[in-house]
Amino acid sequence: MIEVESLDVVFGRGRNAVHAVRDVSFHVAEGESFGLVGESGSGKSTVLRALSGLNANWTGTLRIADQKLGRRRGTAFFKRVQMVFQDPYGSLHPRHTVDRILAEPVSIHRLDNGEARILRALDEVGLGPKFRFRYPHQLSGGQRQRVAIARALILEPKVLLLDEPTSALDVSIQAEVLNLLQRIKRERGLTYILVSHNLAVVAHMCARLAVMNHGEVVEELTAEALRAHAPKQAYTRQLLTASLGYDRAAVDRFEDFAASA
Amino acid sequence: MSAAAHTNGTPLLSVEDLTVQFPTRTGLVEAVRGVSFSLGREKLGIVGESGSGKSVTGRAILGLTPPPGQVRARKIDFDGVDLTRADKASLRAIRGARISMVMQDPKFSLNPVMRVGDQIAEAYRAHGREAGTREAKTRAMEMLEAVRIRDPERVYAAYPHEVSGGMGQRIMIAMMLIPGPDLLIADEPTSALDVTVQMQVLAILDDMVSERGMGLIFISHDLNLVASFCDRVLIMYGGRILEVCEAKRLHEARHPYTRGLLNCLPSIDRPAAQLPTLKRDPAWLELGA
Amino acid sequence: MSLRAEYFLTDQPRSRMQARLGRAYRAWAAFRENKLAVLGLVIVLILVTMAILADVLAPYSAVVGGDLRTERLLPPSAAHWFGTDDQARDIFSRIVHGARLTLLVVAMVAVISTPIGLLVGTAAGYFGGWVDQVLMRITDIFLAFPRLILALAFVAALGPGIENAILAIAITSWPPYARIARAETLTIRNSDYINAARLQGASSARIIWGHVVPLCASSVIVRVTLDMAGIILTAAGLGFLGLGAQPPLPEWGAMVASGRRYLIDYWWIATVPGVAIFVVSLGFNLLGDGLRDVLDPKAQK
């Protein structure tokens, strides 16, 4: 369903050039949940932005449903691929009501039955019609994220790009939102790419994942292999150890994995 | 298990019936209600979600509650001094010199227009140590080495925006520990850091606290982290302490909120098809629950 | 809570209108607490009322004087509250009719300059690149001239008269609004909600109009209100120099100018319109300050 081949993203020019993504390749089958894990600066969010079209200076090949993607994205793309952003406080316009936020995609694409679609979207994410005319500052973090998910779903995409969707949420709310995402995926047969720095979240949501560091894919492995504590690369092992909790002795063995030249 | 410390006799800090209220347009909001605990020379974790009152508690101990907040407590005893009844001069003498605080984001707690080393040296001189510039600089360099910064000379001369997040936190720790306090309050000190850097910063904190025999209050939303790092854990919800337990025995916790919180965490080792969610019982907000 | 308050303050509004009214009500409640701001609003409302009801409120004609032998230069009295001027015209009536002119100037300038400033600023901030450069250099050119001088030049070229004065002031007023709008646009240009709109296929025009402008609007409105005082003074200045409203129109600035000669012995002729200018400018300033406190999103928690 999704194919990324030799993706390269460079910011800036000349001496100030930052090679944010280097030669990244991976495939995601239809209906799969694929995880991209890495620490900050690993390039995982940049990959997502290149895929979504928000960032236009990438090189390589990107394919969705066997169609090559160009620099710009068209209507067909937006109806097929949508994104949920990290910060629930930043992804909703502060002066728009929930209704306006959900009505916008309907209006842009001139879909019919706008009213019914909005109500159905709110229902699907577990918010009732009573939230319809609230402003974002009248919603909690979890509720805002649900609205963001509803907005992504209203165009009925087949692919959802999730950029750290629960990083800014409390743990108990995170569980609810993750469950919601899984239910929606099941009901609609969606394909997910989930970006996160939290290994536990990725292991829970995804069957396969790629670990990134300094713009490169260090290793691709299955969640099972992760759970069996059997990653092949030292960096992945170190990440796994750190994710399991504080272990004083283990910290002494940590290394610095610098970018390869 | 009681919230009182089990150390050799007198606790370092003893908080009794702390309440913090904020008047708002719609009435009085109680951020912290009736919180009591004590702390010896150990690592105490305070865990809670947002709105639980954990940060407000930490700041109230130091007298850093922003106005119009009102702090009331029966007693906040720090090594014999009641912080609620002390005068401003004594509070200033204690704050920074004997109780220090490390906050979440070094970007916001370091002065952006001053070199990092100078800030550490200033912290040294500000807390009652009559020291010349050269001595302060030497001590600052020593602290930078103590927090395992590899080239202290270069970092000393750097500005806050030139160092990474992890290094910024080490610098904060150096700055807060250079006056040699007895108690350190750390409010989400590693939440903004990557997980491997988090572990490294925590190791430094761990070492410094044990070497100097300090007490540490570690405030965080990360239950697993606190359980693996601290000696004892306080769970806060709605401004109150719901449960106290030894970190090692957290999985034996009895309060439904704690159990709920533990269960709804995704775990690498224990796969779950669906994460159990937390059903909030309004009774938890009642006093005496 | 009263029924009305419940309608506005509910956190489950049932329609778009209710949500908007609720937000307006909350803003009003916050505004109301600032006594000085309310004073400013009252002054502005008095100005508006005077302008609308000028024909009813003015006891005498504003342009036709009385008996030139007996009614010139009379001091304030019961018959003439503010006295009469050298043409035997009742000053109070002139002030009241002058309010209409002042309001006209202020409203027209705001209506002309605000959209220009918003459009230029948001376009420059959103598109960046050469669009930004070109628009900002044009803005710089207009900003380089002191407002009164540029207004003078325009009026000198176009000829004296109140319409030309309005045009001249409007042309020189928009650059600061463009700057403000551009600064606001730059801060929000890469926000996730803008990205989300892009990802839905929204065109740039839709994003600028529906997403960017609502966020810039409050800063620009505050700036416009604070500018009103300056606009009134510029119009008065032009009137004073004889380049704005032409006699016998009762424009306050022109009244101050014509009363200058009589300042020592007949102080009311110049002083009263001067005080009127001062009070109205103050009113707009207080109103603008109050609006900023209410509309500034950082203060809106």
Image (cartoon, rainbow, N blue to C red):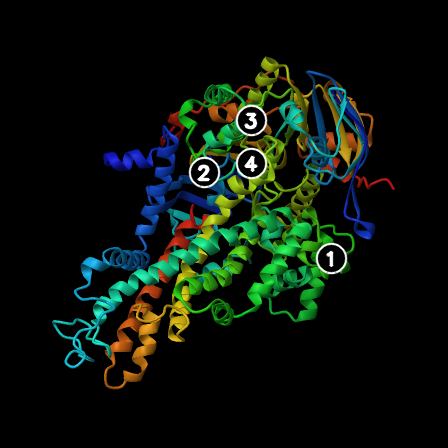
* Residue placed under numbered mark 4 in the picture: A91
Q: Chain of mark 2?
A: A
Q: Position of residue C105 (x, y in %)?
A: 38, 61
Query: Of tags 1 and 4, which is closer to the observer?
Result: 4
Spatial CA distance of label 3 from label 1 is 44 Å
Q: Mark yes or no: residue A171 visible.
A: yes
> Disc 4 to disc 3, how far (Cα)?
11 Å
Q: Quadrant of residue A25?
A: top right
- Mark positioned earlier in the residue sequence (2 or 4): 4
Tell if the residue under mark 3 belongs to the same chain as the one under mark 2.
yes
Q: Residue at x 60, y 15 (%)?
A: A188
> Gap between marks 3 and 2, in whole Å?
17 Å
Which residue, given by chain and number where applicable, does mark 1 sit on? B155
- Image x and y of residue C139, in percent: 58, 60
User: Label 3 sits on what residue type?
Assistant: Ile
Comes first in the chain, label 3 or label 2: 2
Which of the numbered marks, if any, corresponds to residue A137?
2
Q: Amino acid at mark 4?
A: Ser
Q: Residue A28: image x %, image y %?
A: 74, 21
Identify the secondary structure beneath mark 2: helix
Judge the density around disc 4: few (<14), some (14-19), many (≥20) Cα neighbours within 10 Å.
many
Disc 3 residue crowd, few under 14, some 14–19, many 20+, Cα 10 Å: many
